[in-house]
Image (cartoon, rainbow, N blue to C red):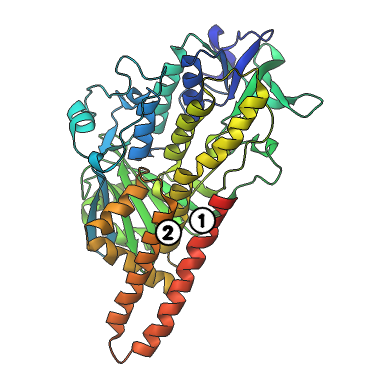
Amino acid sequence: MSSTQAPEELTNADASITYDAIVVGCGVIGPCVATGLARKGKKVLIIEREWTMPDRIVGELMQPGGVRALRSLGMVQSINDIEAIPVTGYTVFYNGEKVSIPYPHKGDIAPVEKLSGLVRDGNDKVTEDTTVHVKDFEDDERERGVGFVHGRFLQNLRDIVAQEPNITRLQGNVVEILKNKENEVIGAKVDIDGRGKEDFHAHITFVCDGIFSRFRKELSPEHVPKVGSSFVGMSLFDAKMPTPHHGHVILGSNHMPVLVYQISPKETRILCAYNSPKLPSDIKEWMKSEVQPIIPKSLRPSFDEALNQGKFRSMPNSFLSGRQNDVMGMCVIGDALNMRHPLTGGGMTVGLNDVVLLMKKIGDLDFSDRETVLDELLDYHYERKNYDSVINVLSIALYSLFAADSKDLKILQKGCFKYFQRGGDCVKLPVAFLSGVLPRPFLLTKVFFAVALYAVYINFEERGALGFPVALIEGISILFTAARVFAPYLYGELIG
């Protein structure tokens, strides 16, 4: 449907009233903010440029931390009836060897918090469908993630929004964030097909316009993401997964990381890292020479078929530390506020946990008391740091190791894989961080440097007695490299 044919209910929003909240953007985070506030009794206007189903290769794997957040919001049934594929852990390949890493036991982590007013009538539990089974998600002892076609998941979220009586939906293009003489945000100017540009007012405006946000700069002109690398993606059809219901990370000392995970019974996503924001001039040739040789045997038929078809998609990999929401009347949230490397699939988990925290902080406040709301938003910035810093820093640290482009990083990469092979806590803690259920940045620091020390130890072992002096010099260099990869990002996330 083109924007000229928008149904009437998407174009007749009332511009004469002051809403409690305006939500700009109806991606993954916008619908959750709008629904949470509506269930708290707020009158919400949500604006989206195009309400038809998008076709994107981002946001297709949700970690257990994201599924848990959807439960807290009473929106977990958004993963139902879209042929979503349950994910039970990861399989990591390294130079042909592999190790299996299952997701954490539910008994090892805190129970899911049910937000009052949002969770009701069993909406924190999945329902039975052809691919998502109640016994797996509700009764199994381990946490589950989920892979899905992004657009189908989004349509489910938007259907939930449509059912909330306190939400008005509007199809239009937000052209400006409105401010008063004191530079406080008072709403948004929207270009609506057939109506022209109109001003809509609210006590608070939530900016959730995603990865390519136009309005994040309203927080600060310096709030700009850094793009350091890219992913080239393809759809594999009828792929035979090496480990069913697992995400796959294919590593090696001489190639960039490759991710493979199933998003529907027929379709599997493959993402191949490229260490530059500018893509190779001949993508097919690059895939043939750099990626094809390292693809596990069972995936080769579907990979070769996709390669012949040559339908490539790409996405930039951005990093952006969160900033304090210190502008009166505005809250930036989701990828518009904060981004991390997509290698670990943590984006939706951070965004959804932000929504959970936001509902706890301001959901029950009177939004016309803008001073109090602003005070709570300033607090919210510090309270979100524990889980967002773990997921964000882990994404960058692991990408540095997995895309190792120096001798020290290659030794760290090998040490990391050998560390996983030890099993027990050497797997249990890293996967808890990865899956977004262990928000403890200082424990992450301890584990990261335990991995680095283990890499040094492995290197000493391989050098033997005669190579001791060389191994000693290398060991110091490896630890220095580990600190350089990890510390600045942790500092930026916790102090910034």
Image: 144 above or below 288: above
The disc label shown at residue 490, or none: 1
Task: Indicate the position of residue 367 as horizontal and vertical percent values.
Answer: 61, 19
Q: Crowdedness of circle 2 by 10 Å Cα count: few (<14), some, many (20+)?
A: some
- State which tag comes first along the sequence, 2 or 1: 2
Image: 80 above or below 236: above
Asked if one can make out residue 28 in the rendered structure from this viewpoint, the answer is no
Q: Secondary structure at mark 2?
A: helix
User: On the picture, is 147 further left or further right than 387?
Assistant: left
Residue 256: quarter of image: bottom left
CA gap, disc 2 and disc 1 = 9 Å
Q: Name the residue rendered at 45%, 25% in the picture.
A: 53
Q: What is the three-letter code of the residue carrying label 1?
A: Leu
Q: Crowdedness of circle 1 by 10 Å Cα count: few (<14), some, many (20+)?
A: many
Q: Are marks 2 and 1 in contact (CB under 8 Å)?
A: yes
Residue closer to the observer: 447 or 211? 447
User: On the picture, is 190 further left or further right than 160?
Assistant: right
Task: Indicate the position of residue 137 as horizontal and vertical percent values.
Answer: 23, 31
Q: Secondary structure at mark 1?
A: helix
Identify residue for label 2. 445
User: On the picture, is 472 further left or further right than 458?
Assistant: right
Residue 479: quarter of image: bottom left
Task: Indicate the position of residue 490 as horizontal and vertical percent values.
Answer: 51, 56
The disc label shown at residue 167, or none: none
Name of the residue lying farthest toward the bottom: 466
